[in-house]
Image (tube, rainbow, N blue to C red):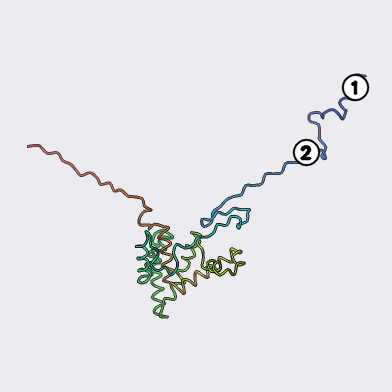
Amino acid sequence: MGAAADNHVEESSPLLPAAVGAAIPADEKPPLAPAPAPEATKLYADGVPVVIGEPVAAHAIPRESWSSGILSCLGRNDEFCSSDLEVCLLGSVAPCVLYGSNVERLAAGQSTFANSCFTYTGLYMLGSSLFGWNCLAPWFSHPTRTAIRQRYNLEGSFEAFTRQCGCCGGLMEDEERREHLEVACDFATHYLCHPCALCQEARELRRRVPHPGFNNGRSVFVMMPPMEQTMGRGM
């Protein structure tokens, strides 16, 4: 009995480690480790990386300038000089063809040139016959300028104006508001200076996108079948 009492005292001593499987009081449980924070997910919108969960301003990429000015009718003296002259000629004589070519390069697909060119031609003729000048086609063509600016992260007219004048800086901080103003400036550019806007867009696209008819620069080899051969008896 004495030995059993000693064992009972030893097992109940608070200085001994707790037995395996013994319940731990709630106030003595170790705190749970915090869950690891989820990793930021990276997405891309219009060629610009966007990180979810982080402010966009922290990863803002400065917008590029257009490769040529809107009044650079003859383009630049570089390897695209002949193409710039062609663009200037088409913009002056056949803007419907130039607009169809721009849409074909921007959104390569079936019948993009024909649909854009014929629609532009109809609006051009309707505006010229009813109002005496091309006032309807710019309403149809100005979204192309917005698409080019967004795809290649180009500087808009409003941003260029604020950068040069140093005013309206607060409007540039709100991306949604700035984009609305840029779209309005795209429309004003097409409406007030339509041929020059078409030519500037064409020069930009020709420096960035090859013509779809060139098959993206890949060579195509055509294998000719061998000619039928006959065996004749020698003399």
126 in relation to 213, above or below:
below
Residue 88 pos. (x, y %): 37, 68
Looking at the image, is mark 2 or mark 1 nearer the viewer? 2
Name the residue nearer the viewer: 3 or 60. 60
Residue under label 1: 6
What SS does tag 1 mark? helix
Residue 48 pos. (x, y %): 53, 56
Q: In which quarter of the image is residue 230?
A: top left
* Quadrant, the N terminus: top right
* Quadrant, the C terminus: top left
What SS does tag 2 mark? loop
Q: Quadrant of residue 21?
A: top right
47 in relation to 5, above or below:
below
Q: Residue at x 48, y 71 (%)?
A: 189
Left/right placement of residue 49 relative to residue 6 reads: left
Left/right placement of residue 87 relative to residue 25 reads: left
**How many neighbours does mark 1 have within 10 angstroms: few (below 14), some (14-19), or many (20 or more)?**
few
Q: Which of marks 2 and 1 is nearer the N terminus?
A: 1
Left/right placement of residue 10 relative to residue 109 reads: right
Left/right placement of residue 2 relative to residue 55 reads: right
Residue 196 pos. (x, y %): 42, 70
Number of on-image labels: 2
Give the Cα separation between the discs numbered 2 and 1.
32 Å
Which of the labelled discs sits on residue 30, or is there none?
A: 2
